[in-house]
Image (cartoon, grey):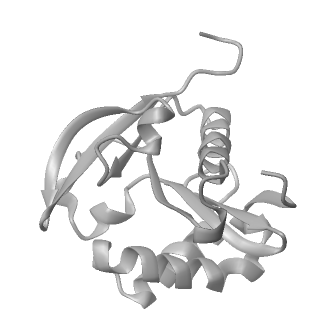
Amino acid sequence: MTDNMEILDLRSAPERLNDVIDQNYRQWGPFTGLDRSSMESLFTSDINAPRDQLPFTLIAIVNQKYSGVVSLRTISMGALTHPEEYLPNVGPWLSNMWVAEDCRGRGLATRLAVRLETNALARGISRIYSSTLVADSLYHKLGFTNICTRIHGPQELHIICKDLVPAGIS
């Protein structure tokens, strides 16, 4: 990606909060069942969380435009309203990954995921979970493995995890 791109902690860019709320409500509201007010509360708590604790949200700014987001949460956004579809007592969860359509296919989602993993490792987290509707997703290419499959409405929801390894250790 040759564009002018930054990945920021949302707490460092609170002026982008409404962009994050609006986009997540459009993208994930129907899937999660969260209304806009619940989405607003969720991301406002991200901004107010201490920097060394969860949740945290990373945003991508490409050419000064909000272009991507991902969060690390103790509970997946989907599990807030559909806990039966997720694994109980595991976490944290890579949640609400999104990249703007005009930025897809250029490595931005990978960069967001890698930065999230680096931040997780810095907090002492060695395993993260996520979910996807795609059986062979980007997450799988990044090293996530399937744990189980659940049914969400008419779709299969794949619960996945990844063990994080510090740089230089294999």
Give the answer, above or below, for where 132 lies relative to 63.
above
State whether residue 164 is above or below residue 7: above
Residue drawn at 61 percent across, 44 percent down: 110
Residue 126 visible to an observer of this rendering: yes
Q: Can residue 55 be seen in this view?
A: no
Seen from the viewer's position, the closer of residues 80 and 16 is 16
Q: Residue furthest right?
A: 4
Residue at 25% across, 71% down = 81
Figure check: 60 above or below 111: below
Asked whether, in this view, residue 86 is left or right of residue 3, the answer is: left
- Of residues 96 and 121, the one nearer the viewer is 96
Where is residue 73 shown, x and y percent of the image? Answer: 47, 55
Given residues 79 and 101, the one toward you in this image is 101
Residue at position x 23%, y 45% from top? Answer: 87
Question: On the picture, is 67 further left or further right than 143?
Answer: right
- Which residue is outermost to the top? 170
Q: How far from the left and from the top, in percent, is residue 152?
A: 16, 62
Q: Position of residue 57 (x, y in %)?
A: 61, 61
Q: Is residue 15 left or right of residue 159?
A: right
The C terminus lies in which quarter of the figure?
top right
Q: Is residue 132 left or right of residue 41?
A: left
